[in-house]
Amino acid sequence: MNLRDASTKLIDRNDLAVLVKKVQASGQTVVFTNGCFDLLHPGHIHLLQASKAFGDLLIVAINTDDSIRGLKGAGRPIYSEQERAYILSALACVDYVVLFHEPTPIPLLERLKPEILVKGAHYSHQEVVGWNVVEAYGGRIERAPIMEGLSTTGAIERIRGIDDSLLKGQTPC
């Protein structure tokens, strides 16, 4: 099975732009958030559920693999863009997933013009990439509460810290 085909919510940006216009024309609110979503953890789920609560349609833009390597370095992403899209597609709060290869999601924001851009509360208003673009066309920024101590980097460090001797003889789940 091809993961791209299985990711029913993964959508091409051109098709998404058409869909967003229809949704907005019907009076519904489009919400946008973005990130790597490299290893999905409870903090991500919390952010996504909080994001969905701000509107009717939640778009999750994820960095492509090449983009993540540029941001995070060698060894990342853990999961490919297709695997990440597949995982996010399984979440009820996520309506659509779109990939972006650019250094920032600004080109997508300019094209889609979502009413609301959501990032975690650990970002100040001016640290939210694209805040000025969104506010220039009349949108707004929302910052969702975060779950302290949860990060992909932290999860990777915890996994690396597991003593391999504890795993010997165990069968995979």
Image (cartoon, helix red, strand yellow):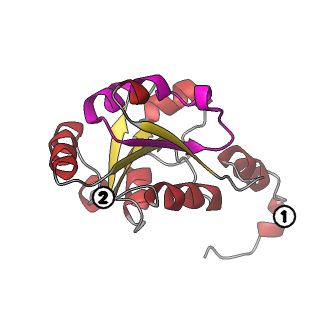
Q: Quadrant of residue 111?
A: top left
Q: Give the x, y percent position of residue 29.
A: 32, 52
Along the line of sight, the residue nearer the viewer: 119 or 5? 119
Q: Quadrant of residue 110?
A: top left
Quick check: can you spot residue 40?
no
Residue neighbourhood size for the residue with mark 1, other residues' Cα within 10 Å, grouped as few (<14), some (14–19), many (≥20) = few
User: Could you tell me which residue is drawn at 61 percent across and 27 percent down?
Assistant: 127
Quadrant of the snapshot with the C terminus: bottom right
Taking the magenta stretch, the answer to whether it contains residue 23 is: no
Mark 1 or mark 2: which comes first in sequence? 2
Q: Which mark is residue 122?
A: none
User: Could you tell me which residue is drawn at 22 percent across and 45 percent down?
Assistant: 20
Closest to the camera, between mark 1 and mark 2, is 2
Q: Quadrant of residue 88?
A: bottom left
Residue ID for mark 1? 165
Q: Give the x, y percent position of residue 169.
A: 75, 74
Task: Give, as a single range, the part of the protein colored magenta.
Answer: 105-133
Q: Secondary structure at mark 2?
A: loop
Q: Amino acid at mark 2?
A: Ser
Q: Amino acid at mark 1?
A: Ser
Quadrant of the snapshot with the N terminus: bottom left
For residue 172, above or below residue 84: below
Along the line of sight, the residue nearer the viewer: 125 or 154? 125
Q: Secondary structure at mark 1?
A: helix
For residue 27, above or below residue 76: below
Residue ID for mark 2? 7
Residue neighbourhood size for the residue with mark 2, other residues' Cα within 10 Å, grouped as few (<14), some (14–19), many (≥20) = many
Separation of residues labelled 1 and 2 (CA atoms): 37 Å
